[in-house]
Amino acid sequence: MVKSKFSLQGKLLFAISLSFAVWVFNYLIQWTIAYVTPDFLSWQLTPILMLPMFFFSAYFVYVFLEKRDVPFSLKLYSSLLFLPVILLLPSRFNISYFNLTACEGVAGSLWKYIYSVEALIIVVIIFMGIKKYIESKDEKIFKKEIIYLTTGVSSFLLISWLSDILGEWTKQYQLNFIGPVGMVIFIGFLAYLIVKFKAFNIKLIGTQALVVAQFILIGSMFFFPQSLTNRILVGVTLLGTTIMGWYVIRSVKVEIERKEELQKLSDSLAIANERLKELDTTKSEFISIASHQLRTPLTAIKGYISLLLEGSYGKVPAKIQDVLDKVYTVNSRLVHLVEDLLNVSRIEAGRIQYSFALTQLEPLVAEVVDMFKPAAKQKKLSLTMRLPEKPLPQLTIDPNKIKEVVSNLIDNALKYTKEGGVTVSLEGTPSVARIIVTDTGIGIHPEDQKNLFEKFLRSKETTKMVVSGAGLGLYVGKSFIAAHGGRIWAESAGPDKGSRFIIELPLINPNIHAGTSDQPSSLEKA
Ligand code: ADP
């Protein structure tokens, strides 16, 4: 499609130039040749030589504006306009008689027809330009291109038309010489379009022009008197240049087509990327809405089960108590999942709010560890806490967010450990504080260690176990820690060798101040 558009534009420009050259050449004959026969023939041929330039120009403008070829039916109808010219060419309607004294043909009514068709074509070109200008609402560059091209082509044709019609009317045929000035205007506008908007493929047109010029130059040697050997040499050179020229034009064309294809590919990639972003936003919005709707009833269920278990509605028989415990656990898991989903959608929408406050880390972590003591006991796992040798200084953190992250790490450690236990240690260096959760569980394959912090990713070892989880906790945790200017990572010697998850928080973070803030910019760096 692109290919044909370009070569078509090139061909049409060539056709315009050629028909213009023939038209000018015809005038030169009329002005310079002193023999009656060629002069008369030239007058006789004038009508058929005038129209093509107009037709090709309109064709060219159409292709430029519509970026496609003219429909076949339109080509057919327009060529019908040529019919009277061809039929009446050898008749008195063309040249009524030949004024031998002035060596001039006297134009008949066919010429009036020609001038009308030419005027019609100029009007059509201007109309096409205006129509396209109105249609292309926001395409500023294209609009400018339309103005330059339509003005250039229509003034070129108008000047040629006026020079003909005025010359005819006033019988001052010198006026005909103004016509070619139009071409200068046309070339001027075209050159401006090429340089300013890269509207045409200058490389291709330039190569074509060069090859044609070379051909004409070498070809013209034929007209100088010379020996047969010379003629053969010129002939061979001409043939060689033509073949080589053809190859050069073809290779330039191929190169342009490749570039076009690449451009098209990158354009469609950009569109696809945009679409993906839109889809991602829609998905996040959906998750957010769905999670909100889920959270309310789930929290209500949790509340009612708690009340039931506490005996607020009377004593619960042991059998039912057992079932209620299970319902409570499963429901808590659901609440947790919904919380994670909500966090993910908030992170992606950049809507996480942080409440930073000066906080002592030891009691905060101890509180979370205590919360998990019953769960550890139930799984017959140890859960111990190791405090730093020296108390840590107070940190500016969002205590709830840090609690959430540590709680997910301990929850995971217990979840992915069958024997042994979990240790939560606190460490301090002059610049950072570390919370380290170590377990004796299933471990992590080296390949998985980095990816675990991606959304929905779970390790191969995990998929072999039957444990709940969506692979969101670490993703959320990484985002929270990054917002504190800290880091979180996993270490493991491999499957079945246990794991270590380390949170590192800076003691002083110049970007974070106590108080509420939106997602800080440090998140982007993470
Ligand atoms: P999940 O809800 O699946 O636990 P997380 O984002 O918290 O989601 O964890 C992601 C994955 O990281 C887990 O599915 C598991 O494969 C792996 N993982 C997390 N903690 C541990 C651990 N302590 N030991 C081994 N693998 C772990």
Image: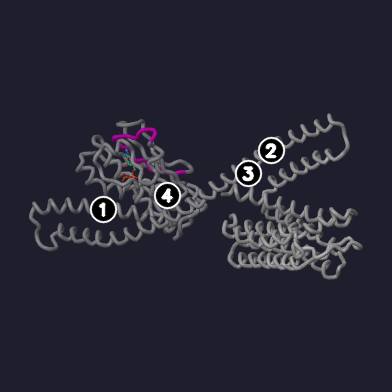
Mark 2 vs mark 3: in front: 2
How far separated are the C-alphas under marks 3 and 4?
46 Å
How far separated are the C-alphas under marks 4 and 1?
22 Å
Q: Secondary structure at mark 1?
A: helix
Amino acid at dot 4:
Ser
Q: Which residue in the protein does label 2 denote?
A: 248
Q: Along the horizontal axis of the image, is 304 left or right of 38? A: left
Residue range corresponding to the magenta coloring: 432-447
- Residue 443 visible: yes
- Dot 2 and dot 4 residues touching (CB under 8 Å): no
- Dot 1 and dot 3 residues touching (CB under 8 Å): no
Mark 2 vs mark 4: in front: 2
Identify which residue, 345 or 189, lies in the foreground.
189
> What residue do we see at 30% from left, 62% from top?
293
Q: Which residue in the protein does label 1 denote?
A: 334
Q: Which residue in the protein does label 3 denote?
A: 256
85 versus 428 height, above or below: below
